[in-house]
Image: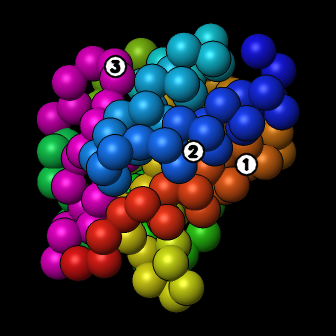
Amino acid sequence: MDRADLITALSSAIAAAPTGESAMQQAVRLLKDAVPYYTWVGIYVVEGDELVLGPFIGKPSPHMRIPLGQGICGAAATAKATIVVDDVNADARYLACSIETKSEIVVPIMRGDTVLGEIDIDSDQAAAFGPADRALLEPVAAMLAERLEEE
Ligand code: SME
């Protein structure tokens, strides 16, 4: 599936999902299945001053709850902007999920100025994420923002 078809499939699935939880599950599944170098795909949801892990596919993460100030996930929520890390082991903010992970992208799910959650993707390939991944994931985050509740 090319990226345009994938965005169309994501848009349909997210809009048609019966609940926000289901929309997140379907987005995670479509992204994980479509992109071979997406090793771990998950969505964190903001609850109070923490990011709480929602649907994910990949190894279980030790980081089920991340304070908003910690990790690359916390940094993206604080910056309200996408963060790409080419080499996680060279980034002091990084909270390790799997020893095999080499690179990571975190895309905030925003409604207006409010961060509702984030899409977090790890890759076992170094420097796996580039402009094409932002161009895929930032629209998906906007679609998910329509389906998530504000805390
Ligand atoms: N690496 C993230 C933590 C989440 S796990 O990768 C699933 C971080 O540094 O915030």
**Magenta range:** 42-62
Q: Label 2 sits on what residue type?
A: Ile
In the picture of the structure, the residue carrying the numbered disc 3 is: 58
Residue type beneath disc 3: Gly
- Please name the residue that numbered disc 2 is placed on: 105
Q: Could you tell me residue 66's position as x and y percent?
A: 22, 58
The residues bearing labels 1 and 3 have C-alpha atoms spaced at a distance of 21 Å
Residue 107, visible in the rendered structure = no
Q: Is residue 92 left or right of residue 69?
A: right
- Which residue shows up at 45% across the image and 24% down it? 29
What is the number of the mark on residue 42?
A: none
Q: Earlier in the sequence, mark 1 or mark 3?
A: 3
Ligand 1 within 8 Å of disc 3? The answer is: yes
Q: Residue furthest bottom?
A: 113
Residue of label 1: 134
Q: Find residue 90 and report its horizontal and vertical position in percent.
A: 52, 42
Of the residues tagged 3 and 2, which is closer to the observer? 3
Element at label 2: strand
105 displayed left or right of 92: right
Element under label 1? helix
